[in-house]
Amino acid sequence: MDFQVGDQVIHWSFGPGEIVDLDEKEISGKSETFYVFQTPTVRLWVPRSDGELCSLRYVTPASEFKQLFEILTGPTSPLSEDRFERRTRLNERLKDGGLDSVCHVLRDLTVYGRTKKLNEYDQTILERARNTLVSEWVISLKTPRMQALKELGDLLAQ
């Protein structure tokens, strides 16, 4: 993707932020261009040459974002009782950085937590997925954070 300075984007690990600059750096004798990505808490240099592997993407448009609600209210996928296997599967799902994967993990862990006690790692993944979704929800749907959290809770309760 070819981002421009001022673009609002999502980093697969750090969430929403903005491209604040393009920076040329020389690494191992080779010149490379980087996107300077800024969030309220972190500034990252993301190689522009990453192409398809780029950890940045545009904010999901509102019309596409609302389609994610179907995942949140849809049928769950069973999670393993074995905590190590469950951890591995959850991480595999989240690797692509897509919001659909985040929604699947959030839905499945929420439902799993209704009948089983979540361990510390499960709780961390659940909170990370919730924060990722809500942070983009606020931007995409222009919804206050508290309202997005309430609506998310309502969807997951169905």
Image (cartoon, rainbow, N blue to C red):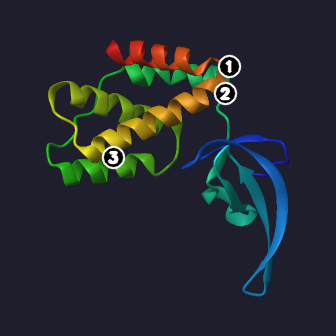
Tell me the crowding category of disc 3: few under 14, some 14 to 19, or many 20 or more residues within 10 angstroms, Cα based: many
Check disc 1 and report its element: helix, strand or loop: loop
Q: Position of residue 43 (x, y in %)?
A: 69, 55
In space, the residues marked 2 and 1 are separated at their CA atoms by 5 Å
Check disc 3 and report its element: helix, strand or loop: helix
Which amino acid type is shown beneath numbered disc 1?
Lys
Query: Splitting the image into 4 quarters, where does residue 128 fall?
Result: top left
- Is 142 situated above or below 44? above
Q: Nearer the viewer, residue 117 or 59?
A: 117
In space, the residues marked 2 and 3 are separated at their CA atoms by 25 Å
The answer to the question of whether label 2 and label 3 lie on touching residues, with beta carbons closer than 8 A, is no
Which amino acid type is shown beneath numbered disc 2?
Ile
Q: Position of residue 16 (x, y in %)?
A: 64, 40
Tag 1 residue = 142
Residue, x 29% and y 33% (percent of image)?
109
Tag 2 residue = 139
Q: Nearer the viewer, residue 144 or 9?
A: 144
Residue, x 23% and y 30% (percent of image)?
113
- Is 107 situated above or below 66? below
Q: Position of residue 47 (x, y in %)?
A: 71, 64
Q: Which mark is residue 7?
A: none
Residue, x 26% and y 45% (percent of image)?
120
The answer to the question of whether label 2 and label 1 lie on touching residues, with beta carbons closer than 8 A, is yes
